Amino acid sequence: MENLLQVKNLSVAFRTDGESTTVVSGASFSIKQSEVAAIVGESGSGKSVTAMSLLRLLASPPAQVLADEMTFFSDGASVDLFACPDQKLRAIRGNRISMVFQEPMTSLNPTLAVGRQITEVLQLHKGMGRRESENAACGLLAEVGMTEPRRQLGAFPHQLSGGMRQRVMIAIALACRPDLLIADEPTTALDVTIQAQIMELLNELRKKNKMAVLLITHNMGLVAEMADTVAVMYAGQIVESASSKELFTNTLHPYTKGLLESVPNLSEKRKNLVSIPGTIPSPRAWPSGCRFHPRCGMCQDECREKAQELWEASPGHFVRCGVQKEKRGGDIG
Amino acid sequence: MKSVTLRRFCRTKLAVCGAVALIALVALAAAAPLVSPFPYDELHLEDLTDGKPIPMFKGKYLFGTDQFGRDYLTRCIFGGRMSLSVGFIAALISLLIGIPLGLCAGYFGGLADMAVMRFTELLSCIPSFFLILIANSVFHASIINVMAIIGMFSWMGICRQSRAQCLSLKEQDFVQSARAMGYSHFYIIIRYILPNALSPIIVSATLNVAYAIIVESSLSYLGLGVQEPTPSWGAMLKVGQDFLRTSSWLAVIPGLLILVVTLSLNFIGDGLRDALDPRASR
């Protein structure tokens, strides 16, 4: 399948009080058409910032985004998201690439009826008239599983529950049938039963519309269920990336292992929940050498000094861990 | 949502009293030619004794007359027309200047913010009444000029408030998501920021109306505002001053009217502030 989005060497820094802190360094990944790509990591690992920088949504200053390549392929043409003029980017935002945010409670305009918020996107990007866009909005609300869509068009956000609002957000994001949907922790703020419903809905709509999804999450269970490819981020770097099957069967990076072990599992008998010791370091002072070494069980002297490079453990499976490389090298040799 | 605000507003007795008084006065002023018993500039010199104003409740003159025998009730109603329209239109002008400047400064930040805010500070550190006084003596004193000048020197508070609102609103998730949907800056400001910033601005706008009415009265009192024979409460106060010992009602009535209107507006402003405050209890 063809590439839809190709990102090479994306770095994001924030400049505050003359001091520059690098939040994302050298992230490279690509998303193919109609696949689900997931970026996983703890809070503060830089995954949301990565997503925001794809649509240049970070305020600059203070943010400084650098990338060797950030190309979006749509309708047989390629657009350089990093360098294209604002106007061109605005025509892509919400139209070819749209976004669903984490907080449904605050992501809708409280002073506009939800119907208007959907029709406005259609009128802007598709040039629809009032009548036409209203009918389309009604169809969209039905599509995301709202009962009585005609009546809900006139509802204000404060009259809807969190799950309903997230459905409306999805309807807005899907209105123009985008090629790529960036879902930034779309279910974190919802309760568990609603989470499952929303993810099911997203998956269903994705299949129907042949749309690719970039799923930003910290939920490994969700990744296992939905994603085709996974990139694990730690401290602003991608530490392991592979197809989802490969990653879960052949986990290499100790951080990924830790993440997987800390998922509670009903079939196992454990006394305590397993967690990775320590917390994610501050971007103001990344640890020297491997950024994970202070929390790593496999840490060796070399890890403390030498910055780790990504290497290809098997075709398409990249890891940023020198210890594993030595082990593997030994195996092969 | 709207009805909750209305219900909370109605719970404040003073605000309701203010609203009733203001509505009554505005209605009277609007219907001035219909409800007033005489034309405001009609002289009844024949009814005067020794050229003295006719006292209240005497004959056909409910509020008496001034020293030219003009019916004082009529002049109060027409004076209200002047004072109230100056108040509302001047406040409207200050909104039209202050809101766009404040929203743009807050939204775009950086150099635009810097320029607007320094200019605002410059204007606010000079006592605006003196600026208005100077401007008013340079331009010829017509009602339109008075409105425009008062409006042009009283937008600073509105501007600062719009900016503050905008600064906090632009960080909100729904503004972020509006950007992710591809809306232009102008559209986001008009549809996403302005409606959400409006309630505190409305509160200060009501206070601006009261301020404009007082300034207009002061100007007219100093003889720089509305000119004879057109009545305005400030100008009537000035004339009344000369008769304070013999015919005190000439000064007391317009003074009371100014007091009632500005107090009402302040009460309404306070009531609105409480009613629109999302943190206040139901």
Image (cartoon, helix red, strand yellow):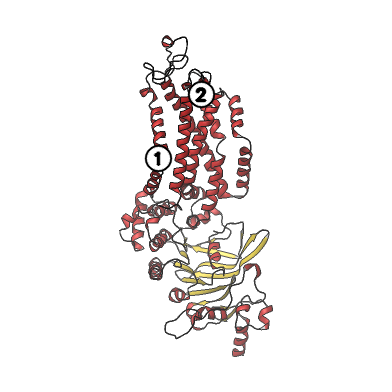
Instruction: Decide: few, some or many residues near mark 2? Use Cα within 10 Å; few <14, some 14-19, many ≥20.
Output: many
Q: Which of B21 and A247 lies nearest the eye of the viewer?
A: B21
Q: Contact, CB < 8 Å: mark 2 with mark 1?
A: no
Instruction: Name the residue at the front extreme.
Output: B245
Dot 2 or dot 1: first in sequence order is 1
- At label 1, the amino acid type is Val
Q: Does any portion of residue A219 appear in the rendered image?
A: yes
Q: Does any portion of residue B88 appear in the rendered image?
A: no
Q: Give the residue number, with chain letter if any, for mark 2.
A: B237
Describe residue A272's horizontal placement relative to residue A148 as left or right: right
- At label 2, the amino acid type is Leu
Q: Is residue B21 above or below residue A67?
A: above
Q: Quote the CA–CA distance across marks 2 and 1.
A: 28 Å
Give residue A270's mark: none
Tell me where residue B99 appears, x and y as whole percent.
52, 42
Chain bearing mark 1: B
Tell me where residue B5 appears, x and y as whole percent.
40, 47
Chain bearing mark 2: B
Tell me where residue A312 appears, x and y as whole percent.
58, 80
Secondary element type, mark 2: helix
Q: Identify which residue is drawn at 64% across, 59% down.
A: A16
Q: Give the residue number, with chain letter if any, for mark 1.
A: B16
Instruction: Name the residue at the left extreme.
Output: A148
Query: Is the residue at mark 2 from the same chain as the one at mark 1?
Result: yes
Describe residue B162's horizontal placement relative to residue B130 as left or right: left
Q: Identify which residue is drawn at 46% across, 37% down.
A: B265
Tell me where residue A76 appears, x and y as whole percent.
48, 63
